[in-house]
Amino acid sequence: MDSIDTVSEAGRLHALYGYDVLDTAPEAAFDGLAKAAAAICGAPMSAISLVDAERQWFKARVGLEVSETPRDVSFCSRAMHGHDLFIVLDTHQDARFSDNRLVTGEPFLRFYAGAPIRAADGAPLGALCVLDVQPRPEGLTAEQASVLRVLADQVEPQLRMRLAVRDREVMAQREQAVALASLQREGRLLSALESAEVGWWDWDVEADRIVASAETAREYGIDPTAAAGGVSMAAFLANVHPHDQRWLSDAIAEALGTGEPFREEYRLMRGGGQVAWTSSRGRCLHDREGRPARFPGISVDITERKLTEDRLREADTGREMAMDAARLGRFDHDLVNGRRFYDARALEMFGVTLEEAQDRALVFSRLHPDDRQRVIEAQDAAINPERRGPYREVYRVHNADTGQERWISGVGRSRFSDGVCTRFMGVLEDVTEAKRAEAHRLLLVHELNHRVKNTLALVQSLVDASLRGASDVVTVRADIAGRIQALSRAHDVLTLQSWSAASTAEVVEQVVSALSLPRARLDICGGPVQLGPKPALQLTLALHELATNALKYGALSNGTGRVRLDWRVAEGFGAGMFQFSWIETGGPAVVPPSRQGFGSRLIERATAAEFGGEVKLDYAADGVRWRLTAPYAGLADRGRSDVPDLVGWPDRPTAG
């Protein structure tokens, strides 16, 4: 039958909807019928198809991926109108179905056989069908056809049985409601709830009337007398915190529609702007037609619990802020459940993810090999019930992501229950900078010790050399003081540069300032030439000797003499040579000394030895000339962590 009368179609749909089965979950009874049909008929696919207005929906299916298809491609919409089996031997050869989307596309049907499913009043509901992707010219055997009819006849009784079971469940719910009302009337439930400080409410959904206990009424700011007689849902919602009203209304609507348990916690507004918390539990009961009927439940004031949670949360926040300020990481190992927790900073220290941190061996593999076993043993001792050792270790960690090596300080403690360690937790601190500072401090101490020793040796050499051949105490005292002061000034220059280097100009300026040389009579000319610590000290001592002699006997001892100080690193012929000149003019006639004293040795041999070059001292009649020439290569770096070793000068006196 290819045409459908619209009046009979309306009656058919009314009958179908009366079973309230469309879009319900799979059920074993219907699945069994579909499986039996497929097995008896040797078909790879079968289905119980119920034909809706615009679709066919499968209550049960075997071998089919979809749960419904449009009605216009349905074979069953034709089969349900017949009085016997509807069979298509080969869809490709049947003009009615050769261009059907289920034939030309998935699942590429070639064979169909369906037995009609009818309501008790004869209204067609759908069909029980078997399908194949291969044509069957022979169709079904007589036995297969007979069994398919019998199975199809079992579908409608199963639909009626399902409806009866649902009705019994609704009746049971109503009986429960009656029993609950009876308990309420008798006062036993009310007494139990009140003794537990639990409020109750019962909402007649259709009448929109909520009867509530005095406890619940006071929670919501409603007069208990009015609540005992019943008030609307709107009256209760009016006292819910404004920020919670919308989502709570949605949750109530969902509970009304699904009949699932209602469990929510939300805020209530009280007098003076105070906020309280309540926890509500309930479930909506539906009538036989599936409409919401009653919604009973209980409510408990949980304000104190929420305040406690807030205080704990604030404490946790304070702890997290303190740890963040101190740049501490945290770990907490649950030894009962085998979970290892590290916060973000701790994970960063080890260079692992939280998932990777569950592997203890992987975490320990990041430790420096020299520290790994010690830390493992310390942790094992801390969680051993017989030892319960303290855990406080400092170790190195290699971060595979950054390639950096960091120093980590870990402090932890264990918790035990019934002689078993249940938790091991603690904090981690990155102490890399502290370790570096400690190493730097030790380096400075060693460096200072080394320099003090060398400086004392230098002073001793200056004193020893000054005393040799001294004519009187006053003179030698002045010489020693002047030379030590020159050494001190040279130290000042080098200290400003962290004992790395000093410019020649700074050395000259220190000598000029210290001895108050008349600047108007000095011709100073030189470029930015850097000297290492040892050459700088030696040049300072040499210039101090030359300047002292010039003030006493030379060009600066009268009112007209001049001194030219000139230095450079030569270019062209002799390139790379450091040259320094001290040339006096206009002073008294120069008389060469009768003997060579310490000062002469200082400005000649000691300077030449220190610079690794040549020194020429000329006592010309018109003025002293002193010239230093030395290879510049290495002068700027020489003695960066040392001072001139005057103990090794060629004229150092031997023992005995």
Image: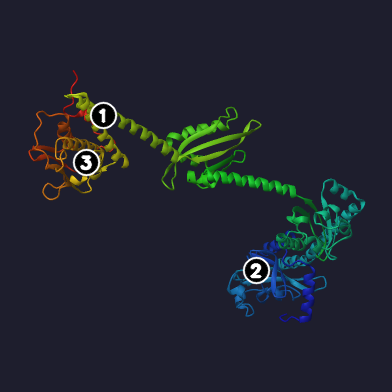
- Residue 459: assigned label: 1
Q: Nearer the viewer, residue 3 or 622?
A: 622
* Nearer to us in this view, 165 or 276: 276
Residue at 65 percent of width and 75 percent of height: 73
Q: Nearer the viewer, mark 1 or mark 3?
A: 3
Q: Is label 1 in a helix, a strand or a loop? A: helix
Residue 499 visible, this orientation: no
Is 486 left, or right, of 563 in this rendering? Answer: right
Nearer-N-terminus badge (2/1): 2
Kindly give the residue lying farthest to the right in the view shown: 186
Q: Residue furthest front?
A: 559
Q: Which circle's residue, 1 or 3, is located before the other in the chain?
A: 1
| Residue that mark 2 sits on | 131
Vertical order, 596 against 212 (above or below):
above
Q: Which residue is mark 3?
A: 517
Q: CA distance from mark 3 to mark 2?
A: 119 Å
Q: Earlier in the sequence, mark 3 or mark 2?
A: 2
Q: Would you call the spot at circle 1 few (<14 residues within 10 Å), some (14-19), or many (20 or more)? A: some
Look at the image and tell me in which quarter the C terminus lies: top left
